[in-house]
Amino acid sequence: MIVATPIPRCHTAELRVTLGREGVGLGNAERPVYFRNVGRHVCFVYGYAGFGLEDAQHRVQRSQVHWGPTYFGGYWKKRRVVLRPGQSARTILAWGHVSGPGENQYQCEPISEWLEVTPPDERTFVRVRFHDTVCGHGFMSSPPLRAG
């Protein structure tokens, strides 16, 4: 009799988070966000990542994340993504580059030097270099993670 071992969820310490190249279109910006399994065992991710903004001194800046499709896509459904060591899952992080109500016309928000990224179902985040401006008072959108 063969007993299947359940696959555990990936934890923050087992994932290396990196950002892809920025794309822009009609006042919107996006960057792919990759979660690579750097652990020694198979694990899975499921759902949405969390994001936050920080200035150069790691002070938290105003931000809000909408989980769902973005201007650039992301109409896929939540699915469990199994990651063998070295494999990656990804999502898109999108935001506006155009000033909104209550924002300065020329510099909508202060520059965010760091992005806090929390894997699905985790409580700890990792910081990645960001150096960008998120208009709309820090409003961002992101679909669920998928293989990639």
Image: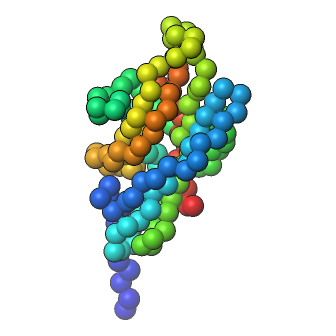
122 lies above or below 142 = below
| Vertical position of residue 75 compared to residue 147: above or below | above
Residue 44 seen in render: yes
Question: Quadrant of the image for the C terminus?
Answer: bottom right
- Determine the image quadrant of residue 51: top left
| Residue 3 screen position, x and y as percent | 35, 84
Q: Toward the viewer: 4 or 110?
A: 110
Q: For the point 50% across and 27% down, which residue is it?
A: 134
Residue 119 position in % (x across, y down): 39, 50
User: Which residue is depicted at the point 47% across and 19% down?
Assistant: 109
Classify residue 115 as left or right of residue 132: left
User: Farthest residue toward the top?
Assistant: 102
Q: Position of residue 110 (x, y in %)?
A: 43, 22
Count of all numbered marks drawn on residues in the image: 0
Q: Residue furthest right?
A: 26
User: Residue placed at 51% from the left, 11% from the top?
Assistant: 103
On the rendered image, what quadrant is the N terminus found in?
bottom left
For the question of whether residue 7 can be seen, the reply is no
Q: How is the image coloured?
A: rainbow
Residue farthest to the bottom? 1
Question: Residue 27 location in percent, x, y?
Answer: 66, 26
Give left or right: position of 21 versus 138.
right
Using the rendered view, name the quadrant where residue 23 is placed.
top right
Q: Nearer the viewer, residue 93 or 56?
A: 56
Q: Is residue 99 above or below residue 57?
A: above
* 6 on left or right of 66: left
